[in-house]
Amino acid sequence: NAGVTQTPKFQVLKTGQSMTLQCAQDMNHEYMSWYRQDPGMGLRLIHYSVGAGITDQGEVPNGYNVSRSTTEDFPLRLLSAAPSQTSVYFCASRPPAHYTQYFGPGTRLTVL
Amino acid sequence: SQQGEEDPQALSIQEGENATMNCSYKTSINNLQWYRQNSGRGLVHLILIRSNEREKHSGRLRVTLDTSKKSSSLLITASRAADTASYFCATDYNDMRFGAGTRLTVKP
C-alpha cells in the first residue's frame, strides 16, 4: 500500500512552459485535492474532486486545470507556467464520510 | 481566504516543557483537525475533534474546541526535540482549509 504518491519530486520550468504534476493513490479514496504551500501562507486549496468525473475549484484555481478520469489519479496541469506558481504542491486524499486527509510527499516547483 | 489562523506563528521551548498553540476560524464547522509537517515533508494527521466535542486527548496531545469563540487549542505535553515541526489546524465545511501554521522548535 503506497498511499499517496506524487511525481516528480522536483521540477524547474521556464515561464510559459506547461507541465502536469501527477498524483495517485491506492486506497480507493473518493476525495482528492491539490494544495500549494508558499512560505508564510500555509496551504491553499487549488482544486478538489469528490469522485471520478467530478472536480471543483478551491481558493486559488487560476492557472491550473484538473481532471479525474479514474478514482486513483488526479493530475494537476499548469497550462502556461508563471513565476508566481513557484511553490510546493501537495496532493491529498480521503475516503468518503471521513475527514482525515492523507498527504503525498509534495512536488517542489520552480518557475524561472 | 484561509479558514484557520494559528497563533503564535513561531514558538521555541525547551525539551520537557509544554507547548500550546491556538487556532481561530471563521465559519461553522463539522470538525477541526490538527496536522504536523516536518520540514520538507507532507502533512501528517494528528487528531480530529468534532464540533460537538469540547476536549480530546491522544497520547501527549490535548485538543480543545470552543465553537462559541470559533477557536481551538493544541497542547503538547512534555515536549521532545522530535516534536520540532510546523503545526496546522484545518477546518472542514464544504472543503478543507488550512491555516498558516505554528512553527514549533523544541531545544534539547
Image (cartoon, coloured by chain):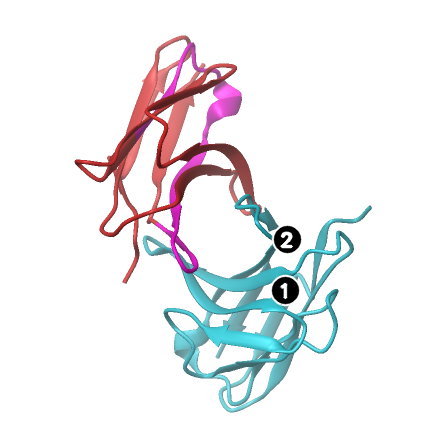
- Check chain identity for marks 1 and 2: say if they share one: yes
Residue at 55% over, 43% down: A100
Lateral position of residue A50 relative to residue B106, left or right: right
The N terminus of chain B lies in quadrant: bottom left
Residue at 39% over, 27% down: B105
What color does chain B have in the rendering? red
The residue labelled by disc 1 is A10
Residue B91 falls within the magenta-colored stretch: yes
Seen from the viewer's position, the closer of residues A66 and A105 is: A66
**Quarter of the figure with residue A75:** bottom right
**Quarter of the figure with residue B17:** top left
Circle 2: is it few (<14), some (14-19), or many (20+) Cα within 10 Å?
many
Q: Residue furthest left?
A: B69
Instruction: Tell me the SS state at disc 2.
Output: loop
Lateral position of residue B26 relative to residue B15, left or right: left
The residue labelled by disc 2 is A104
Residue at 55% over, 63% down: A33
